[in-house]
Image: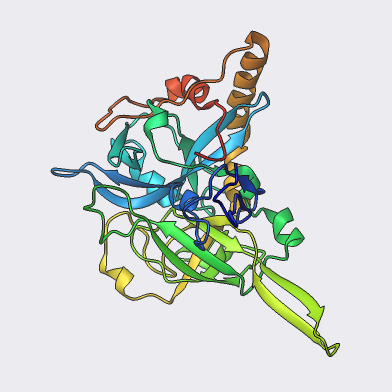
């Protein structure tokens, strides 16, 4: 099996939820940001003429069920979801055949916000259960990758650690595929309390990374600083620092002290270079609110009682217009209740 192969790297340890194993060496094994991160990103927009106008970013999160099944959710900024709610809208995803699928949402599509702090947590979720799922070239972010409060303490995540944002660059959207831009920076502040922003207060971390139009709702990842210590041949202490595995730090809100809206404005031309980020802990609290957990539990019980097969991958075709309604929520979760591989 190894004849003619030398120094193959078949284990990818860049992910905070644990190593990923492969039979062949991934093409992106030497990249600082794996392809799987960029594949978690989707573009969201409203109907336009002649094509939908994409102005925001969303990403997919995967929550494990109790029977080797999983539930998938679309996450974006609250101020983005509020512009989509009650309207026809589109989510554009890449397909494995090199084209894109425009998944249509309707005014009945339900959005969930933070159950107790909606006004201060700029994040929202809906389910992700499109038809013809297997055809889409997307990768979910596992809940285990969330840098919740416990992981921040465990891994010493703090000021100066490296972060990066993957999302929509609105100046490059007339392409045959979604091509996310990646911006990098550092953790600048972890306040530990609500901070003033605009006309109110928000739950947010601050990162030193300039936000641009289209990044609202983008996933933000952090890589803790790892230090190796040792001695040289003279017995002197030596230290070498670098970045560790990455975790989902939260989701992008937008510019600091710039009016938030879903349309492009000239405000993005000038900002303070500081971006507020919704903490991953708050996104987790939205996904695990009682209303959603109740439906997930019901589906888990159905699978266990009926020994129901896990739903197969089923992905949307180009131009698919099947509506998502609140009445369809439980059925949609049945489709989302599936086993997802950590690798393609």
Query: Position of 66 compared to 311: left or right?
Result: right
Q: State which quarter of the image contains the N terminus.
A: top right
Q: Residue furthest front?
A: 3
Decide: is 81 above or below 159. above
In this view, the residue in front, 59 or 79, is 59
The outermost residue toward the top is 306
- Residue 41 spot, x, y in % from top left: 42, 48
Look at the image and tell me whether residue 87 can be seen. Answer: no
Q: From the viewer's perspective, is residue 151 above or below residue 258?
A: above
Q: Residue at x 43, y 21 (%)?
A: 328
The image quadrant of residue 150 is bottom right
User: Residue 280 location in percent, x, y?
Assistant: 59, 52
Q: At which x and y percent is residue 157?
A: 68, 65
**171 sits to left or right of 28:** left
Given residues 274 and 341, the one toward you in this image is 341
Scheme of image coloration: rainbow
Q: How many marks?
A: 0
Q: Is residue 159 left or right of residue 219?
A: right
The residue that appears at 38% across and 75% down in the rendered structure is 271
- Residue 52 drawn above or below residue 303: below
Q: Is residue 14 above or below residue 66?
A: below
- Seen in the image, is 136 located left or right of residue 33? left
| Furthest residue in direction right, as rendered | 235
- Residue 193 position, x and y percent, is 65, 63
Identify the residue at image location x=48%, y=19%: 331
């Amino acid at each position: 099996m190894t004849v003619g192969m030398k120094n193959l790297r078949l284990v990818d340890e860049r992910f905070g939820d644990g190593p990923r194993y492969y039979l062949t060496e991934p093409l992106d094994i030497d990249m600082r940001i794996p392809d799987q991160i960029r594949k978690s990103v989707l573009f969201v927009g409203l109907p336009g003429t002649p094509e939908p106008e994409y102005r925001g970013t969303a990403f997919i999160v995967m929550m494990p069920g109790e029977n080797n099944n999983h539930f998938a959710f679309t996450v974006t900024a609250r101020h983005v979801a509020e512009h989509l709610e009650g309207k026809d809208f589109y989510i554009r995803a890449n397909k494995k055949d090199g084209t894109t699928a425009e998944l249509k949402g309707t005014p009945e599509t339900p959005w969930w916000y933070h159950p107790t702090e909606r006004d201060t947590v700029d994040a929202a979720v809906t389910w992700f259960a499109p038809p013809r799922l297997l055809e889409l070239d997307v990768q979910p972010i596992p809940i285990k990758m969330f840098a919740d409060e416990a992981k921040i303490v465990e891994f010493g995540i703090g000021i100066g650690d490296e972060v990066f944002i993957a999302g929509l660059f609105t100046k490059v959207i007339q392409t045959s595929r979604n091509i996310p831009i990646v911006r990098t920076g550092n953790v600048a502040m972890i306040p530990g309390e609500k901070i003033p922003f605009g006309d109110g207060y928000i739950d947010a971390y601050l990162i030193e990374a300039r936000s641009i139009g289209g990044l609202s709702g983008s996933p933000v990842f952090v890589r803790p600083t790892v230090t190796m210590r040792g001695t040289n041949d003279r017995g002197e202490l030596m230290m070498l620092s670098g970045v560790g595995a990455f975790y989902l730090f939260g989701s992008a809100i937008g510019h600091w002290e710039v009016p938030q809206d879903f349309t492009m404005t000239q405000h993005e031309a000038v900002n303070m270079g500081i971006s507020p980020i919704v903490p991953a802990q708050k996104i987790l609290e939205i996904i695990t609110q009682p209303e959603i957990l109740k439906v997930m539990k019901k589906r888990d019980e159905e699978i266990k009682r009926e020994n129901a097969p896990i739903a197969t991958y089923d992905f949307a075709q180009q131009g698919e217009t099947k509506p998502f309604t609140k009445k369809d929520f439980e059925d949609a979760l049945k489709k989302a209740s599936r086993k997802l591989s950590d690798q393609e």
